[in-house]
């Protein structure tokens, strides 16, 4: 049973797109919870990952990157970020070590300064810079705001991850545990399946395409096949233009086949079952600006 000194609560990672928030969440959890990509603005959902420790239960909330929106989708994602950080106990502002803090970082630091949550500066990607450059960067970060703590980390090498977890956990309120033992995420299975397909589809695509990609799981069925029980998953990949549909499918359907193979492996690992994945690509013109289509796609 947790003692009277047990702490439990929510900590969210915020920052500009591509600040390393999702990669950091996965590294702390030791497994894939949030999808990642080199493309900015990959995260579109609030992802909750539950880390169980002897003295605390830390619920990590990964959020989309706050950005200057150009579409209704962008506005809704920003609203989601602001709603999330108003409800958590601790905020980790992610600032990449290889990029000087800029206007976007100052803007976010200003927005979160007046919230009730304690704010920790998390300097990510420290494996990409020298020790001297890191020292200079930490000085710049300290000048950005009055942070409760500043923790430099590398999700890639694991450096200082334990220290970050300890810093976040000690700032949580005293509380009994909020989730049962063994539960590592409250993400619905369908959402995670769709995200794995989107992650596979994002690999190697051109700049304008990532924002136009969305995935919906249409149906899931249990079936018996020659190799034993398996899940049959029907999914649709949405893009905004016919030319984008051609890019996703590829010559002779080769690219879609590769996307399906990679996504199927990820889904099989997620649900610990054999999987048959049926993928189709649909065009929904300018869906990022269409309120009805956004609702259908879960935004």
Image: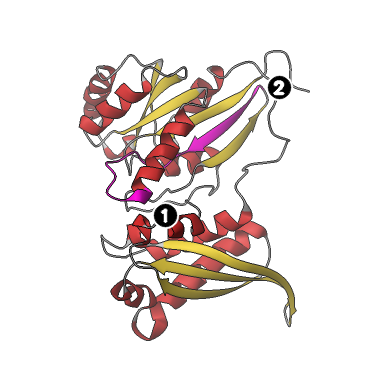
Secondary structure category for the residue under label 2: loop
Q: Position of residue 12 (x, y in %)?
A: 48, 31
For the point 36% across and 18% down, the residue is 113
Residue under numbered circle 2: 176
Question: Looking at the picture, does residue 298 appear above or below residue 143?
Answer: below
Residue 12, numbered label: none
The image position of residue 103, as x and y in percent, is: 21, 30
**Residue on which the image places disc 1:** 291
Q: Is residue 56 magenta?
A: yes
Q: Which residues are magenta?
A: 55-73
237 or 90: which is nearer to us?
237
Please tell me which of labels 1 and 2 falls first in the chain. Answer: 2
| Residue placed most toward the observer, 123 or 81 | 81
Looking at the rendered structure, the number of numbered marks drawn on it comes to: 2
Can residue 75 be spotted in the picture?
yes
Residue 229 shows in this picture: no
**Mark 1, mark 2: which one is toward the viewer?**
1
Q: Secondary structure at mark 1?
A: helix
- Judged from this view, the residue extending furthest toward the bottom is 252
Q: Residue at x 56, y 55 (%)?
A: 191
- Mark 1 is surrounded, within 10 Å at the Cα level, by few (under 14), some (14 to 19) or many (20 or more) other residues, namely few
Could you say which quadrant of the image residue 58 lies in?
Answer: top right
* Distance (Cα) linking label 1 and label 2: 40 Å
Residue at x-position 25% and y-position 37%: 98
């Amino acid at each position: 049973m947790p003692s009277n000194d047990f702490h439990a609560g929510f900590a969210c990672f915020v920052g500009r797109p591509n600040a390393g928030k999702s990669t950091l969440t996965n590294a702390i959890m030791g497994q894939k919870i949030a999808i990642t990509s080199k493309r900015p603005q990959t995260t579109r959902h609030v992802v909750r990952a539950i880390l169980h420790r002897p003295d605390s239960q830390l619920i990590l909330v990964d959020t989309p990157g706050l950005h200057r929106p150009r579409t209704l989708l962008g506005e809704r994602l920003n609203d989601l970020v602001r709603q999330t950080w108003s409800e958590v106990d601790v905020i980790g502002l992610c600032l990449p070590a290889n990029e000087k803090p800029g206007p976007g970082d100052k803007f976010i630091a200003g927005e979160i300064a007046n919230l009730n949550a304690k704010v920790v500066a998390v300097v990510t990607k420290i494996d990409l810079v020298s020790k001297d450059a890191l020292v200079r960067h930490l000085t710049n970060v300290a000048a950005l705001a009055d942070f409760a703590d500043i923790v430099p980390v590398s999700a890639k090498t694991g450096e200082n991850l334990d220290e970050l977890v300890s810093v976040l956990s000690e700032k949580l309120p005293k509380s009994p545990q909020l989730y049962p033992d063994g539960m590592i995420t409250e993400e619905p299975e369908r959402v995670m399946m769709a995200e794995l397909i989107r992650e596979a589809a994002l690999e190697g695509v051109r700049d304008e395409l990532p924002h136009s990609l969305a995935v919906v799981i249409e149906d899931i069925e249990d079936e018996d096949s020659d190799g034993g029980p398996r899940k049959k998953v029907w999914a649709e990949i949405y893009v905004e233009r016919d030319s984008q549909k051609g890019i996703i499918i590829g010559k002779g359907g080769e690219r879609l086949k590769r996307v399906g193979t990679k996504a199927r492996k990820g889904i099989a690992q997620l649900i610990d079952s054999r999987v048959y994945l049926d993928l189709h690509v649909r065009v929904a013109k300018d869906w990022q600006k269409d309120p009805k289509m956004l609702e259908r796609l879960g935004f």
